[in-house]
């Protein structure tokens, strides 16, 4: 599976591109990032996979389709007690993924009815670095993609709230076969076209 994040605004981050190539069950995904100041994409690996994109509260984990290594259910009463999800979303299952080499571990609440991750805590050697919570799930017709998310930097307590303002839009598969510059121009043009009043 290939996922791409393209940043169009703000201007200082425009042309930022993150690409994630992953397969369920893999120990680690292939992640590359290209900032406007870079001549070429660079790989993101190891402990850096548990951090955020530069100048944002968007974690690389938040863009992945699955946890790597694969998560496993947490035994009730284990160290998941500090993780919570909104009761309004319904019953959840707590799962854990750990990377012993980097010292990072991730706890997640997975919504039982939809399979969507609705809360996440990231810890490094037992100390929480960030958390993430779905405040509103989207409709079933759009795969319950979250409509509103809050991400918190644990050390400072500062948070960013992300609100999805449009419906998901299909991307032609052929765009992924072209170079990155073409892909970004095509996405930009598509969004600009749909934003015009009818």
Image (cartoon, rainbow, N blue to C red):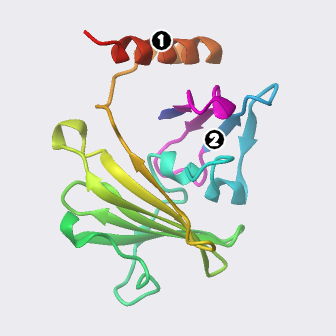
Secondary element at tag 1: helix
Examine the image and state in which quarter residue 190 appears. Answer: top left
| x 41%, y 77%: residue | 83
Counting from the top left corner in percent of width and height, residue 4 is at 53, 32
Q: Nearer the viewer, residue 193 or 51?
A: 193
Q: Nearer the viewer, residue 57 or 12?
A: 12
* Label 1 crowd (10 A; few <14 / some 14-19 / many >=20): few
Work out whether 36 lies above or below 53: above
Secondary element at tag 2: strand
Does residue 96 appear to the left or right of 153 in the view shown?
left
Work out whether 197 lies above or below 32: above
Counting from the top left corner in percent of width and height, residue 50 is at 62, 59
Q: Are marks 2 and 1 in contact (CB under 8 Å)?
A: no
- First along the sequence among labels 2 and 1: 2
Question: From this viewpoint, is residue 22 visible?
Answer: yes
Counting from the top left corner in percent of width and height, residue 73 is at 37, 73
| x 82%, y 25%: residue | 39
| x 48%, y 60%: residue | 151
Magenta range is: 5-29
Q: Which residue is mark 1?
A: 189
Examine the image and state in which quarter residue 136 appears. Answer: bottom left
């Amino acid at each position: 599976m290939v996922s791409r994040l393209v940043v169009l605004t703000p201007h200082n981050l425009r042309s930022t591109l993150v690409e994630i190539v992953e397969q369920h069950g893999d120990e680690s995904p292939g992640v590359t990032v290209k900032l406007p100041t870079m001549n070429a994409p660079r790989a993101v690996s190891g402990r850096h996979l548990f951090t955020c994109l530069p100048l944002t509260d968007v974690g690389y984990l938040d863009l992945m389709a699955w946890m790597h290594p694969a998560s496993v259910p947490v035994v009730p009463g284990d160290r998941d007690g500090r993780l919570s999800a909104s009761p309004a979303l319904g019953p959840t299952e707590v799962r854990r993924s750990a990377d012993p080499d980097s010292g990072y571990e991730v706890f997640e609440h997975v919504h039982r009815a939809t399979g969507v991750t609705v809360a996440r805590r990231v810890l490094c050697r037992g100390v929480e670095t960030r958390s993430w919570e779905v405040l509103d799930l989207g409709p079933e017709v759009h795969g319950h993609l979250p409509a509103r998310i809050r991400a918190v930097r644990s050390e400072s307590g500062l948070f960013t709230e992300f609100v999805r303002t449009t419906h998901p839009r299909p991307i032609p598969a052929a765009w992924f076969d072209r170079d990155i510059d073409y892909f970004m121009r095509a996405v930009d043009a598509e969004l600009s076209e749909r934003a015009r009043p009818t």
